[in-house]
Image (cartoon, rainbow, N blue to C red):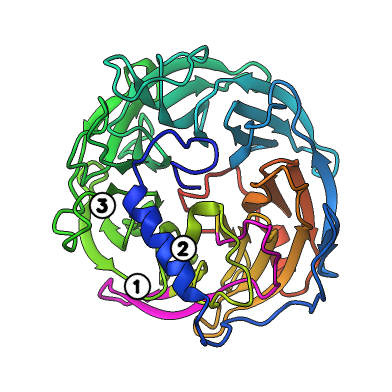
Amino acid sequence: MIRGLGGDVSRARLKAVLVAAVVLLASACASEEEPASSPAAAPTGIPGQDEIRHSPNMTLVANVPLAAPFDGPDDWGTDMAFQGRYAFVGNYGGFTVHDIGDPEHPKAVARVACPGGQNDISVSGDLLFLSVDEPRTDDTCASDAGDPAAAGAWEGIRVFDISDKTHPRYLKAVRTECGSHTHAVVPGRDAGTVYLYVSSPGPEPDTTNCRPPHQNISIVEVPVADPGQARVVAKPELFAGRPAGEEETGGCHDITVYPDKDLAAGACFGDGVLLDISDPVHPTLLQTVRDEKNFSIWHSATFDNKGTKVVFSDEMGGGMAATCLPSVSATKGADAIYTLTPERRLVRQGYFKIPRVQSAEENCVAHNGALVPVPGRDVMVQGWYMGGVSVWDFTDSAHPQEIAYFERGPLPPDLHLGGSWSAYYYNGYIYSSDITKGLDVLRLDDPRTDPAKAVRLEELNAQSQRPY
């Protein structure tokens, strides 16, 4: 979700990007391009308010609703991470720890109040990291929304000790330039160090923490044995030389790393980037790709398991718009599949967008997802906000197809943001963080994906890929 929309309307950091997104959304209505995908099933009509629909091979087996202290109007569920028998779910008000040892009977074992948009979340060993991308009055969990021009305004990374999953303990805060919208965990050269690649939009001239030019990311070094010493160790400039008119938009929305391949792919406000991360503190730019006809807000990236493809998503409209309409092309607000050549060059092959029409009252666009670990095939599960959860196969990069889905009908008229923020496959089940409904657990039963049930992971951060 884009900063400056939804729960954080007080800042204009992405004004230029969002204006471009509105223009592109309007032009999309006149498109005559053919759809780029085929449905798993052919539903007819729009579901009723909160009505559940799903393909025959997808079943909702559990839901854990949002609960106090996350029961306010802006306590939206956000991203997820997994470790052992636990799922960690971010929220604008903090985060929740769920015991998913019995996936069909999950239960919340801790709810930690620590407000800050958007609390993008990851875990590594006994440490948990939260991204805060809004100025706070200080770096504590008791802070309030702050004045971005104030000298003491804080935003960045918060670090928690989760050795006791029922009682997470706040350890450290690290201020990062322009805050932290998202981050990716990158292993160090030994087990004693992890790095965080911090993505944030900017610049914003009239602020304390986000002065121009901000054509960089921030890299935070975390000593595992002494996380209180975490600090920014590098701010590599990766985006200088953007086209005229875009120099004032910098940073990235999201970076996904694949350390086993020494690669990272970034969705970076106007373009996609491919990075060499063989030296994690000094990443180097390999290639920049653009799609000015179809993409407006490059949102996220996912490698295939072999590291020979990258899926980039476009969050057209910033997560607030209804882009899953017949009038909007299947190549806009969608995913783009790129192959990665042996020379490490990205070549676009095709697009995917959910084939199920949504109503004009439903925010719907490509959002967070990751691989379903099916050996020998390229399958992804992804959240589409009010478009629900989609499972799609891109083994044939030019002809991707949806093979399963789950969705709810429109929200009540007084609610304007909802649906699946993130959807990930973990140890036999799909978990979806629904913005207003809480944690959904879905079972996928399909001969094309059943081999994934044999793949077991000890930890999953979607932005930090590992081979399976």
What residue does disc 1 label? Answer: 291
- Do callouts 1 and 2 mark residues in contact (Cβ within 8 Å)? yes
- Say left or right for 250 vs 139: left
Label 3 element class: loop
Q: Is residue 461 highlighted in magenta?
A: no
In this view, 111 is above or below 143: below
Q: Is residue 44 above or below residue 230?
A: below
Tell me the element at label 1.
loop
Whether 339 is among the magenta residues is: yes
Number of numbered callouts drawn: 3
Q: Which residue is mark 3?
A: 278
Q: Secondary structure at mark 2?
A: strand
Q: Residue at x 25, y 25 (%)?
A: 208
At 56% across and 85% down in the image, what residue appears?
A: 399
Label drawn at residue 42:
none
Residue name at image x 64 percent, y 31 percent: 75
Q: What's under tag 1, amino acid-wise?
A: Asp
Query: Is 325 in front, or is 156?
Result: 325
**Which of label 2 and label 3 is nearer to you?**
2
Based on the displayed image, in which of its 4 quarters is residue 20 positioned?
bottom left
- Confirm or deny contact between disc 1 and disc 3 (CB under 8 A): no
The x, y position of residue 136, in whole percent, is 42, 20
- Decide which of 77, 292 is in the foreground and name it: 292
